[in-house]
Amino acid sequence: MLNRNLGSQGLTVSSIGLGCMGMSSTYGHADDKASIESIRQASESGISLFDTANVYGNGHNEKLLGQALKGMSDNVSVATKVGIQEMALNQKRVNGRPEYIRSELEKSLNRLNREYVDLYYLHRIDPDVPIEESIGEMSRLVEEGKVKYIGLSEASLSTIQRAHKVHPLTAVQSEYSLWSRGVEKDIIPYLQAEGIGFVAYSPLGRGFFADDFSLQASQEDVRHYLPRFQGDNLTANQEVFKVIRNLSQNLGITSSQVALAWLLQKHRNLVAIPGSKSIQHIRENIASSYLELDDEIIHLLDKTFNESNTHGDRYPSMLMGELEK
């Protein structure tokens, strides 16, 4: 696995990490035993960044990851998040209060069976708490040795700038893929200039860019509730997808490898964390870090996948309201 520096604070990780959220039923049924084996094989194959959050499965995901990495943690970096509470969608779900951040970290450390978290993100920005207060508490956790590096998830440029003045940010995490490119204009250039790393979650469009994409029948598959996977939006998006499928067939690689290679090639300070329960898919993702697409292919993908050709928002309207603009 090829490694990259994530930011300029000293964290080096594999260019392809593993997003573990889907191992806690987010995309349908998941088998703990199979997930643990996939995590261990991913580590043995060179993946060194594993991403989770306290809210995934109400703590189940952190506990699963802690169990899987037991005895292997010397060679891996664990990233987890705080800030989203498991609450009804018609109520406030975001909490950035300092006391909440501290108390949740203790729970996360216990579930992960670790003495510290390598990378601790504020999962969403609480509009009722100044970012300086949230980051200030996270900075104190660094001083106490409970956290090594801190980051933000789905934050606006102004919030990133304010937070970075309080404590150096190691990484910003946001959704970024062929059909989610909102960070390209302002955020990524700022991060590059300031030596802050970028972590792309859902780099395969929540599985949409995989050759074997399908929605699980179970309503546990959260994609049933996402606009891009509904009705006419899904049909229209599948038509656009044919471009990448035909391209990948001509190149003799998978569609997901094309999507990941495009992402890694565009930004050298970027790390991608595709999620998967399958070690076969994980190994395909790892192989994409070695691919080089020529400029003509990059241009074709840039032109084909843009806001006007992508149908549907990333989240339902209630959750879109949690994203800073």
Image: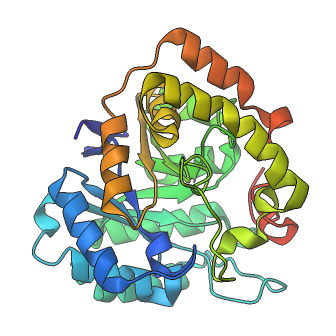
Up-down relation of residue 239 to residue 93 (above or below): above
| Depth check, front residue: 184 or 253 | 253
Q: Residue at x 44, y 68 (%)?
A: 138
**Left or right side of 7 for 312:** right
Name above or below for residue 1 compared with residue 234. Answer: above
Residue at 28%, 73% in the rendered image: 146
Front in this rendered view, residue 92 or 208: 208
Q: Nearer the viewer, residue 66 or 185?
A: 66
Asked which colour scheme the image uses, the reply is: rainbow
Q: At x 37% / y 64%, what residue is drawn?
A: 278
> Is there any visible trace of residue 154 in the rendered image?
yes
Compared with 153, 62 (above or below) is below
Where is residue 94? Give x, y as percent.
68, 77
**Residue at x 46%, y 60% (from the top left corner):** 275
**Would residue 291 be found to the left or right of residue 176 on screen?**
left
Picture layout, residue 230 above or below residue 171: below
Q: Is residue 311 visible?
A: no
Q: Residue 192, how many percent across, how many down?
A: 49, 29
In x, y percent, where is residue 131? 62, 62
> In which image quadrant can residue 317 be found?
bottom right
Q: Foreground residue, 17 or 285? A: 285
Quadrant of image for the N terminus: top left
Q: Horizontal and vertical percent for residue 87?
A: 70, 89
Q: How many marks?
A: 0
Judged left or right of residue 110, residue 245 is right
